[in-house]
Amino acid sequence: MSFAGTTTWADPFLRWNHALDLDDASPGDSDVGRVRWNGDDLVETGEFTEGDRTVPYTEVWRRVGGSDSDLESHWSPDGTCVVVRTGDHALTIADDRPTGGGYRACYRTRHDGRWSVELALGPGATDLPAPPPTEEMHPAMGVPTR
């Protein structure tokens, strides 16, 4: 599973709206989960449909070290690529399938001021842009996808 989009809150539910989604049948879809705090962990419960059956799930969201700063997300003008960063963690997702390309995602961590690829999905994913320095990121920034 890999997607990017927006999240909205309506107590006790979080809704994730998928603007980009590895499951190309889902872009524009949203998923909803009931959330509650359990200590420092955010616990999400819900269900999804798989074929003709309903499957319950529980996810535990735990903050990782080095992520305790503001969240920054910046979309390319055409909406096909996003760079998301919080602290020393960054994710870039690009979906070029509408123009004959592929879906790519790259997760990076920063150590000593340098970004290192930790996980990559899709051919050319490691070529996706790493986030620029915070002072260079701004809402109108275009993110190159190739």
Image (spheres, grey):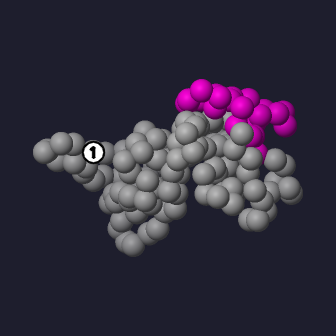
Q: Is residue 122 above or below residue 57?
A: above
Query: In terms of secondary structure, where does tag 1 sit?
Result: strand
Q: Is residue 89 above or below residue 16?
A: above
Which of the image's four quarters has the N terminus? top left
Sort mark 1 into few (<14), some (14-19) or many (20+) by Cα contacts within 10 Å.
Answer: few
Instruction: Give me the residue at 25% from left, 49% from top.
Output: 48
Q: Is residue 123 magenta?
A: yes
Q: Is residue 120 left or right of residue 66?
A: left
Q: Is residue 141 magenta?
A: no
Instruction: Give me the residue at 46% from left, 68% from top.
Output: 8
- Residue 59 on image: x %, y %: 37, 45
Q: Which residue position holds label 1?
A: 57
Q: Residue furthest front?
A: 100
* Any part of residue 44 in sight: yes
> Which region shows up in magenta?
109-131
Q: Is residue 123 left or right of residue 55?
A: right
- Residue 77 on image: x %, y %: 69, 60
